[in-house]
Image: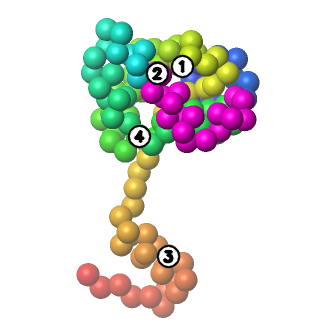
């Protein structure tokens, strides 16, 4: 288990009908609602704005684009709280928080071209 993943329950695979984005968002929404009643308003607001959620193989993955939000979620107390809340909602699902870095389209195209043409490609800026 990586540092961004916490067991929320037994770690057993979730039911098959949970393996889609609608279910992932619904499950995360329940965690966010539970946070609303907690003493962590900043965490509630931060989590409420996250939309890139997936559920695969019994792991609810929250993809975070901003590093400061990722650091907030990865704080030991916050991560334990999120795992506990998820465990109360569905004890068969584990929580994973991932920092999602994005390349811009131009960088991605340059990487593809370099792979295709190798040293024959000269890029001027």
Residue 49: x percent and y percent? Answer: 33, 34
Residue picked out by circle 1: 86
Q: Quadrant of residue 40?
A: top left
What span is in magenta? Answer: 14-31
Residue picked out by circle 2: 31
User: How far apart are the alpha carbons under marks 4 and 1?
Assistant: 16 Å
Residue picked out by circle 4: 51
For the stretch drawn in magenta, what is the main secondary structure? Answer: helix
Tell me if mark 2 has few (under 14), some (14-19) or many (20+) residues whose alpha carbon lies within 10 angstroms of its own.
Answer: many
Mark toward the viewer: 3 or 2: 2
Residue 89: x percent and y percent? Answer: 56, 16
Mark toward the viewer: 3 or 4: 4
Q: Quadrant of residue 23?
A: top right
Q: Nearer the viewer, residue 64 or 29?
A: 29
Is residue 19 shown in magenta? yes
Residue 41: x percent and y percent? Answer: 28, 17
């Amino acid at each position: 288990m990586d540092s961004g993943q916490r067991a929320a329950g037994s770690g057993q695979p979730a039911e098959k009908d949970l393996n889609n984005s609608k279910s992932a968002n619904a499950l995360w929404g329940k965690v966010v609602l539970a946070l609303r009643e907690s003493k962590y308003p900043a965490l509630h607001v931060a989590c409420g704005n996250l939309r890139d959620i997936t559920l695969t193989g019994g792991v609810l993955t929250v993809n975070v684009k901003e590093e400061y939000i990722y650091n907030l979620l990865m704080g030991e107390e916050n991560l334990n709280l999120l795992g506990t809340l998820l465990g109360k909602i569905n004890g068969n699902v584990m929580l994973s928080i991932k920092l999602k870095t994005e390349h811009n389209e131009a960088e991605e195209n340059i990487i593809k071209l370099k792979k295709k043409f190798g040293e024959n490609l000269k890029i001027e800026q």
